């Protein structure tokens, strides 16, 4: 899985998508410290321990660099940045039953717009899984010969996950 590069100064506007989700009762917002355990446990349950470890790290950043999508006090998805390395986006994920509704794209856009506001000109999507999604959503381009990159030598579970 290659890393991908995104020009933050050429991002699409997030507001139309956020407005559509809000009309459906879905809020996309920066997570706050008191809900850290809820978010980290959800990530561990829905995805895997490595992503939970990364997500937990975001709560030490100021501001917190984890964004969540919620509806009626239920977590639907999350997205993080500045975790494994500065200027890296990810991990990110949406509950499997809710994919395809724009939640993942909204989380991607708010994180990337936040990175721009924090002073970054570019973002790197680390070990981008859905390359076509990122290419279409934010014109991300694959970085040649970037795998395993910063993940080289990382300790992994027997199943290959972090």
Image (spheres, rainbow, N blue to C red):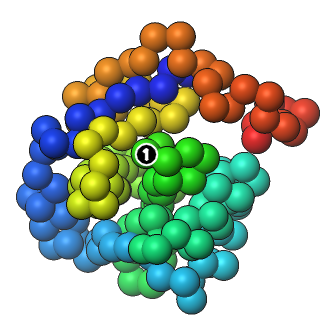
From where the camera sits, is residue 152 visible?
yes
Image location of residue 51, percent across then percent down? 65, 52
Residue 125: give x, y in percent of width and height: 44, 36
Q: Residue placed at 39% from the left, 83% from the top?
A: 72
Residue 16 location, x and y as percent? 9, 58
Bin the neighbour count of mark 1 within 10 Å (Cα to Cα): few under 14, some 14-19, many 20 and up: many
Which quarter of the rendered picture does the N terminus lie within? top right
Q: Would residue 2 be found to the left or right of residue 106 on screen?
A: right
Front-most of 119 and 82? 119
Image quarter for residue 149? top right
> Does residue 130 lie above or below 68 as drawn?
above
Q: Quadrant of the C terminus?
A: top right
Residue 149 lies left or right of residue 113; in this view the side is: right
Q: Nearer the viewer, residue 99 or 52?
A: 52
Q: Nearer the viewer, residue 57 or 133?
A: 57
Q: Can you name the residue that lies furthest to the right here? A: 158
**At 54% from the left edge and 18% from the top edge, which residue is drawn?**
146
Residue occupying image coordinates x 49% and y 48%? 86
Farthest front residue?
119
Q: Which residue in the structure is indicated by mark 1?
A: 87
Task: Please give the name of the residue rendered at 24% of the width and 60% of the height, measured from the top-left corner.
Answer: 117
């Amino acid at each position: 899985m290659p890393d991908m590069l995104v020009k933050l100064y050429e991002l699409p506007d997030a507001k139309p998508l956020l407005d559509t989700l809000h009309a459906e009762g879905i809020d996309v917002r920066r997570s706050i410290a008191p809900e850290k355990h809820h978010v980290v446990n959800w990530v561990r349950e829905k995805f895997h321990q490595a992503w939970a470890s990364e997500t937990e790290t975001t709560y030490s950043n100021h501001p917190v660099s984890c964004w969540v999508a919620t509806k009626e006090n239920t977590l639907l998805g999350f997205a993080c940045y500045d975790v494994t390395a500065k200027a890296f986006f990810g991990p990110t994920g949406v509950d499997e039953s809710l994919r395809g509704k724009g939640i993942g794209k909204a989380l991607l856009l708010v994180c990337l717009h936040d990175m721009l506001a924090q002073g970054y000109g570019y973002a790197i999507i680390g070990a981008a899984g859905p390359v076509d999604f990122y290419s279409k959503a934010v014109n991300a381009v694959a970085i040649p010969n970037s795998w395993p990159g910063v993940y080289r030598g990382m300790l992994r579970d027997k199943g290959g996950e972090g």
